[in-house]
Amino acid sequence: MAGNAALLARRERLLGRNMSLFYEEPVHLVRGQGVWLWDDEGRRYLDCYNNVPHVGHCHPRVVEAITRQASTLNTHTRYLHEGILDYVERLTATFDASLNAAILTCTGSEANDVALRMAQAVTGRTGVIATDHTYHGNTAAVSQLSTRMPPVGGFGGHVRHVPAPDSYRPLGGVPGEAFAVSFAGKVEEAIASLQASPHGFSALIIDPFFANEGFPDLPPGFLDRTVAAVHKAGGLVIADEVQPGFGRTGSHMWGHQRAGFVPDIVTLGKPMANGHPVGGVVANIDTLNAFRKAFRYFNTFGGNPVSCAAAMAVLDVIEEEKLIENARTVGAHARAGFERLSGKHALIGDIRGSGLFMGTEFVLDRATRDPAPDLATRIVNAMRERGVLMGKIGVHQCATKIRPPMPFSTEHADLMISTLDDVLSSL
Ligand code: PMP
């Protein structure tokens, strides 16, 4: 702990106060393997949060791919290399046939930045719609979309926010079809407002799983009307798959496939190369070519040989270890555990999610559904004290965010549930 205080002071002196840390008592990690992490005192933590080491911390297959390629060749992206072609071929094969080409980047922010400009290149317009509790990254352009971290000087006139879907407290008070109609109505209003502005309407950008918004449980086809409204207005749908992608939801490889629509542009990041910084933008080749006509684009590191080797190894492991199926069965097992807990603890107001992306929403009162963000903070910190790492998210900041490495097993899920039971009993 004393060591943590010294590290914190050093961090603040050298890095400033940017990039805030998790937990009242931050964790000083020194090693990871599979779903486990160890701190500097040798204490082990169950990682229920990290979607970046998607196939498990330090997966030997990914480590080997990085080592092999780094000791053979790594260079910027101005030369011919098969690595990027083999990877993009393999990646695009997991999408609808219309999404047949890609640009690789280093981060999800960059991918979204490029996607906005692609939409601009195709439509000739700049107006963008996002939800009011989203996060799409940190570049000057995409930070314009995030109400969590509003830009200095306010949002540009080209941005409109629509209310994030909240299945526990649906817009208009009614779930199901009426909720979908209300959401689409808000998007239509935003489209009309942009059309009446000098910016025009270019794109709707959404995470099809609404991860940062608290991953509401939405009825099948929830986004159908919205997607139709965007296309009717000549706009593009950008699906930000940074969080739900690569099979995490246990039912599909991609969140938009689960939601049942085909986007015009897809952006990727976080889990793509198990922690090696790789992101991507997938679209039709015509969209990529329109982008090339409108903007000059070059990315020194995006899609370099080492990044592609790491990203390819991730696809191999997802397939060989049947991690999507694992997400489905272990996710269902964990959900059943949460259901049992909710019979015992009235604090649990809602349980939602899919596969290995789930959480519970804590409320002060089940009847009024009053959010309990302070309690959620206490719970997440108490879990950390007991060696289980999870996060907190959502419109009301009272939902736990559970998104472990994909080789998470039923035993790990049981440990998570029993620890949460202890914590809730101790409150
Ligand atoms: N999109 C979403 C949905 C995200 O959650 C994030 C990061 N939390 C980003 C984009 C940005 O990705 P990066 O941090 O790699 O730039």
Image: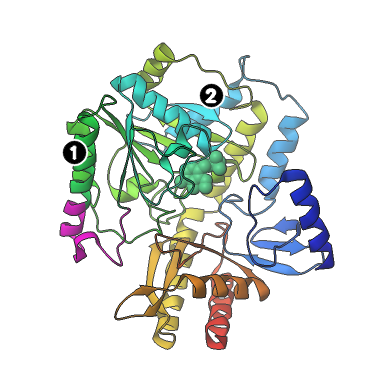
Tell me, yes or no, whether the highlighted magenta stretch contains residue 173: yes
Q: Residues within 10 Å of mark 2 (few under 14, many from 20)?
A: some
Callout 2: helix, strand or loop? helix
Image quadrant in which you'd find residue 213: bottom left
Disc 1, SS: helix
- Name the residue nearer the viewer: 240 or 101: 240
Label 1: few (<14), some or many (≥20) within 10 Å?
some
Taking the spot 55% from the left edge, 53% from the top edge, the residue there is: 51
Of callouts 2 and 1, which one flags the residue occurring earlier in the amino acid sequence?
Answer: 2
Relative vertical location of residue 161 with respect to residue 159 in this rendering, above or below = below
Q: Nearer the viewer, residue 296 or 32?
A: 296
Taking the image as drawn, is residue 242 in sight?
A: no
In the rendered image, residue 297, in percent from the top left (x then y), is placed at 51, 17
Give the answer, above or below, for where 121 lies relative to 318.
above
What amino acid type should be assigned to the residue bearing mark 2?
Leu
Which residue is labeled 1 in the image?
Answer: 229
Left or right: 120 as drawn, with respect to 201: right
Q: Position of residue 320 (x, y in %)?
A: 55, 49
Q: Is residue 44 above or below residue 417?
A: above
Q: CA distance from mark 2 to mark 1?
A: 35 Å
Residue 76, quarter of picture = top right
Q: Quadrant of the N terminus?
A: bottom right
Which x, y percent locates residue 382? 61, 76
The answer to whether residue 118 is above or below residue 395 is: above
The quarter of the picture where residue 87 lies is top right
Q: Which mark is residue 85?
A: 2
Quadrant for the C terminus, please: bottom right
One can see residue 135 in this view: yes
320 vs 369, left or right, is: right
> Which span is picked out in magenta?
164-182
